[in-house]
Image (spheres, grey):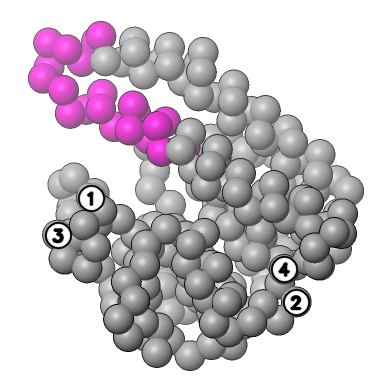
Amino acid sequence: MITVHHLEKSQSIRILWLLEELGVDYLIQHYKRDKKTLLAPPELRKLHRVGTSPIITDDDVVLPESNAIFQYILDKHGNKGLVPQPGSAERVRYLYWLHAAQGSIVPLMYMQLVFSRLKGRVPWPLKPAMKMVDAQTNKSFLQPKLNNILAQIESDLSESTWFAGEQFSVADIAMGYCLEVAEVRCGMDARYPNAQSYLSRMRARPAYKKAQEKNGVFEPLGK
């Protein structure tokens, strides 16, 4: 049976959600972040050298990385309609958003979080300079890129109910986490009504609610 090694306030909420959508039985091992650093505990590194979340174990398999875990679970349990057919227009959008989530959006959000938190962790003589670096990096690089992505999200969701089309897919599970974080940290506010409506639909899904029950209410890390 799959065990989800689940770090609080992390991307591993996605794995719980996928397993609930598929109706697959699983176990959860919960981990708390360090209260001071907010990093994952050393126990995760005992499972896999990279020590990041999510990680699943399944007999002798130890596997990190969200998209790799998605594919492993789908290969083992079938996709039950959560993956559009090859050759379809929906498949193209599915592939884009599935991989944009991890390849583009999460790295930008992570960099934004790191720069923001560094302001409070450098020696006090460096704080004014670090504050300027954070502000300029966010203004000139990070937020403009995120704004472009948010505009594309808003456009695509004006054309369909879900990210790949009218059928809910694994791309929605990948992107759902991103939108939860974007709402808290990246300026995804009332200027993006389609994205906000999407979050409401997402949060109403029974499988998402079950994942929340097992996770506890999901709260992304703030700045």
Query: How far separated are the C-alphas under marks 3 and 1?
Result: 9 Å
Q: Position of residue 183 (x, y in %)?
A: 57, 44
Q: Nearer the viewer, residue 115 or 27?
A: 27
From the top left corner, tell me how far across and down residue 187 is, in percent.
Answer: 58, 34
Q: Earlier in the sequence, mark 4 or mark 3?
A: 3
Pair 3/2: label in front:
2
Residue 167 spot, x, y in % from top left: 81, 67
**Quarter in which the C terminus is drawn:** top left
Is residue 22 among what the camera can see? yes
Q: Mark 1 or mark 2: name the one nearer the start of the chain.
A: 1
Q: Which residue is mark 1?
A: 39
Q: Nearer the viewer, mark 1 or mark 2?
A: 2
Q: To which residue does mark 2 refer?
A: 81
Look at the picture and state if 190 lies above or below 74.
Answer: above
Find the distance from the CA under tag 3 to the CA under tag 2.
37 Å
Task: Name the residue that disc number 3 marks.
Answer: 42
| Label 3, residues with CA under 10 Å away: few <14, some 14-19, many ≥20 | some
Q: Which mark is residue 121?
A: none
Q: Determine the residue positioned at 67% across, 77% down.
A: 79
Point out the tag, 3 or 2, that comes first from the N-terminus: 3
The amino acid pointed to by label 3 is Pro
Circle 4 is placed at which residue position? Answer: 83
Report, in whole angstroms, how far the alpha carbon at label 1 lies from the one at label 4. 33 Å
Q: Residues within 10 Å of mark 1 (few under 14, many from 20)?
A: few
The local secondary structure at tag 2 comes to loop
